[in-house]
């Protein structure tokens, strides 16, 4: 599996001092910052938008290479992911990870053929994100089977293939929820077919759950409450990293 990437979720940071908290988290050994964007529609919660991302970007040195230290891994829990691509690029986002469920709107389809047509839209969105100069990720909620990804990962066009897959291990919307081990077979299935893929897990990760996730093959680890709630965040970050790399 590719090397460990530790991405603390700033959802659990002190929102009144986000800049210093972000800067300190990188100093504490984090690779990326996981930036949770919620719109109150796709998930029943609200966080923040581009102006806040601009401000925290000024506290964290922009990476000079893809996947580098300080990468802003923006987890877009929003109903209209295409609409916000350019704004988030401008704001300083490096990796734009949208939800599969928001990219196909089968509820509005009028026929089975139309549903099939819409299957190409995650690939189009990935291509668009790449054209705008960001890495592209695709996220799955717990209810979405991993099988929806095989076509997308097998696309012959490199621009249409995601740079990362995010398997949610809680229902998106809130920090501090209980880890769902039921999602790990998705990680296992992805890892067995794609040894080099960046596979991110998000929700309920910490010292008590990291081994299961790492054994299943996850290498990009999001942790919110486990890092920001710790007495010694640097220690938790290094424990997570060592668990993935061992
Ligand atoms: C939940 C968010 C997560 C959240 C994780 O919707 O996507 O990134 O911050 O928080 P913990 O690590 O506390 O479960
Ligand atoms: Zn997240």
Image (cartoon, helix red, strand yellow):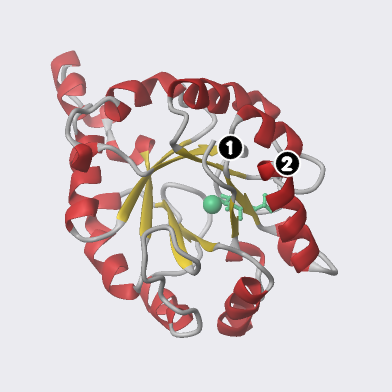
Quarter of the figure with the C terminus: top right
Position of residue 154 relative to residue 233, above or below, is: above
Q: Quadrant of residue 18?
A: bottom right
Quarter of the figure with the N terminus: top right
Position of residue 162 relative to residue 11, above or below, is: above
The number of callouts visible is 2
Q: Nearer the viewer, residue 21 or 199?
A: 199
Q: Nearer the viewer, residue 145 or 131?
A: 131
Secondary structure type for disc 2? helix
Which residue corresponds to mark 1?
A: 218
**Residue at (14, 16) in percent of width and height:** 113
Secondary structure type for disc 1? loop
**Disc 1 residue lies near ligand 1 with CB under 8 A:** no
**Residue 25 placement, left or right of 58:** right
**Residue at (23, 31) in percent of width and height:** 108
Residue 88 % position (x, y): 31, 66
Q: CA distance from mark 1 to mark 2?
A: 9 Å
Please give the label number shown on residue 210: 2
**Residue at (18, 40) in percent of width and height:** 124
**Residue 76 placement, left or right of 141:** left
Position of residue 150 relative to residue 1, above or below, is: above
For disc 1, the neighbor class at 10 Å (few under 14, some 14 to 19, many from 20) is many
Residue 173 in view in this figure: yes
**Residue at (19, 45) in percent of width and height:** 127
Query: Which residue is farthest right?
Result: 231
Residue 32 % position (x, y): 53, 62
For disc 2, the neighbor class at 10 Å (few under 14, some 14 to 19, many from 20) is many
Please give the label number shown on residue 150: none
**Residue 128 placement, left or right of 141:** left
Q: Quadrant of residue 25?
A: bottom right
**Disc 2 residue lies near ligand 1 with CB under 8 A:** no
């Amino acid at each position: 599996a590719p090397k460990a990437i530790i991405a603390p979720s700033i959802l659990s940071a002190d929102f009144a001092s986000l800049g210093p908290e972000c800067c300190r988290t990188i100093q504490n050994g984090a690779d990326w910052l996981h930036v949770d964007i919620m719109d109150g529609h796709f998930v029943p919660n609200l966080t923040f938008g581009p102006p806040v991302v601009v401000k925290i970007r000024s506290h964290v040195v922009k990476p000079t290479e893809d996947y580098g230290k300080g990468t802003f891994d923006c987890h877009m829990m929003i109903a209209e992911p295409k609409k916000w691509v350019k704004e988030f690029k401008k704001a300083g986002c490096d990796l734009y990870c949208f939800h599969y469920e928001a990219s196909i709107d089968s509820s509005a389809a009028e026929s089975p053929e139309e549903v099939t047509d819409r299957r190409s839209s995650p690939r189009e969105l990935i291509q668009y994100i790449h054209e705008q100069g960001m890495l592209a990720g695709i996220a799955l909620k717990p209810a979405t089977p991993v099988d929806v990804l095989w076509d997308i990962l097998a696309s012959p066009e490199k621009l249409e293939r995601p740079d990362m897959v995010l398997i949610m291990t809680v229902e998106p919307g809130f920090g501090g929820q209980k880890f769902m081990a039921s999602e790990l077979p998705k990680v296992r299935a992805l890892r067995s077919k794609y040894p080099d893929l960046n596979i991110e897990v998000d929700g309920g990760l910490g010292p008590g759950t990291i081994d299961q996730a790492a054994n299943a093959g996850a290498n990009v680890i999001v942790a919110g409450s486990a890092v920001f709630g710790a007495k010694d965040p640097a220690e938790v970050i290094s424990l997570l990293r060592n668990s993935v790399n061992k």
